[in-house]
Amino acid sequence: MRARGDVHDKLGAVLIALVAGGSVEMTSSWQRGWASATFIGARHRYRLQVYAAPEAELEAFAQTLGKHEFSLPGHLVADICVRELTRREGNDATLEIEALTVDVF
């Protein structure tokens, strides 16, 4: 059985790399096991602080994240979205991202 923490950390690293412009810091994250009648996986939440990112690029990221093809061996990103995008002073923002990953055997 795979350690779910691995996919959580890998997905977090991919999200940080995907945020366009500025610098990004993960300020919090959590995961919780998830299962349906036919699948097992995990729910994930990430809070990212983004510094000096152009507003248009953050908006585009938020709108297109769900269409991104993720490559996480042994896992499928079944659902992902930006739950909240909060603008701060200047071009700083906070992103709340939720995802559901499913183990692929």
Image: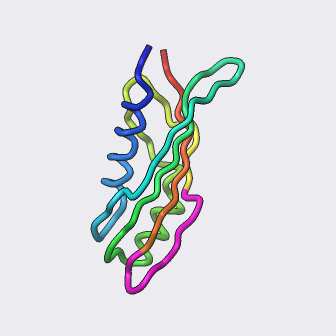
* Membership of 68 in magenta stretch: no
Farthest right residue in view? 37
Image location of residue 9, percent across then percent down: 36, 39
Q: Quadrant of residue 16?
A: bottom left
Indicate whether 40 appears above or below 50: above
Q: How many marks?
A: 0
Q: Nearer the viewer, residue 42 or 67?
A: 42
Q: Residue at x 39, y 58 (%)?
A: 27
Image location of residue 49, percent across then percent down: 39, 66
Image location of residue 82, percent across then percent down: 54, 58
Q: Residue at x 55, y 49 (%)?
A: 98
Taking the image as shown, residue 2 lies to the left or right of residue 38, namely left
Instruction: Give the magenta range.
Output: 82-92
Q: Quadrant of residue 55?
A: bottom left
Give the colour scheme of this rendering: rainbow
Q: Residue at x 49, y 44 (%)?
A: 30
Q: Residue at x 71, y 19 (%)?
A: 37
Farthest left residue in view? 23
Indicate whether 70 appears above or below 76: below
Q: Nearer the viewer, residue 58 or 89?
A: 89
Q: Nearer the viewer, residue 55 or 12?
A: 12
Taking the image as shown, residue 19 lies to the left or right of residue 38, namely left
* Quadrant showing the N terminus: top left
